[in-house]
Image (tube, helix red, strand yellow):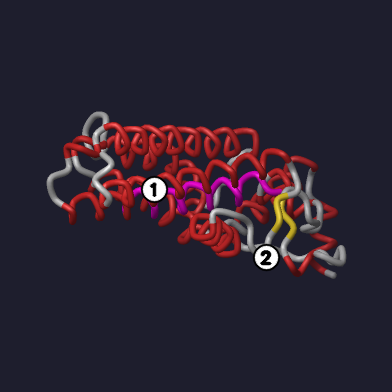
Amino acid sequence: MEQQQTEQKLPPAHKHLSAEQQLIGQVPRLLVSLCALLIGVCYFFLPDQLRIGPGWTVLAIEVILLIPLWQFWVTGRAIPHRVARPLSLTLLGLVTIALIIEMALLITKISTFSSGFKLLSSAALLWISNIMVFALWYWNIDGGGPRKRHINNHQASDFMFPQQVNGTPWEAHFFDYLFVAFTGATAFSPTDTYPLSRPAKILMMLEGLISFLIVAVLISRVANIF
């Protein structure tokens, strides 16, 4: 009751700031940061023939784009959604392009791998990156992102989780999208969570294709096709 009275006394600008702080504060800071940084770590440990530029490039770009989000967690100063949203999509676009380039280099330069362990470890790093990249994509696009999902009471939008089948509002956390990405990369298709929108379907197709190509490249190398 006291909180409602306090909010009523606040000017509109302060009410907006308070709402932004509550919404941004719901972002799972540790898990999302670790997931994004793991993509850069995987890129760093890839062999030279699968990278363009220094190994620390992707990691450095990720840190730069994550600084505004970390700044909120440290200082408590809310980031406007119109700023945070483009930053997150820019980060996802860059790591997705990097993943596609890595995959293309793996296919074209597979004959340069003289060590089976080196090839297998490179494929594993790409597979992990594939899961992390698309987990972030799914979490960012579903319902317009975490902020809009919260505003719309977590109704099924781009993805339908089993808990939402009967139209029941259910809040999906980042780990749920990570699970969707993992099953998509393993089964090459949706499992218990279904894509409803075209962007979600395109992303799941792309993730399944990349995962399938990784497996196909490994099998072809074993069979001495390349």
Image location (x, y in percent) of residue 223: 27, 50
Q: What whole-number distance in Å separates the C-alpha atoms at marks 1 and 2? A: 25 Å
Taking the image as shown, residue 203 lies to the left or right of residue 40, namely: right
Image location (x, y in percent) of residue 78: 59, 46
Query: Which residue occupies the foreground of this view, 23 or 121?
Result: 121
Q: Which mark's residue is nearer the viewer, 1 or 2?
A: 1
Q: Residues within 10 Å of mark 2 (few under 14, many from 20)?
A: few
Q: Are marks 1 and 2 in contact (CB under 8 Å)?
A: no
Measuring 85% from the left and 70% from the top, which residue is drawn there? 1
Taking the image as shown, residue 110 lies to the left or right of residue 6, namely: left
Q: Main secondary structure of the magenta part?
A: helix
Measuring 58% from the left and 56% from the top, which residue is drawn there? 27
Would you name the residue on which mark 2 appears?
Answer: 192
Measuring 54% from the left and 59% from the top, which residue is drawn there? 187
Inspect the image, locate mark 2, and give the three-letter code of the amino acid beneath it: Asp
Q: Quadrant of the C terminus?
A: top left
Which of pointers 1 and 2 lies earlier in the amino acid sequence? 2
Inspect the image, locate mark 1, and give the three-letter code of the amino acid beneath it: Ala
Q: Residue furthest top?
A: 53
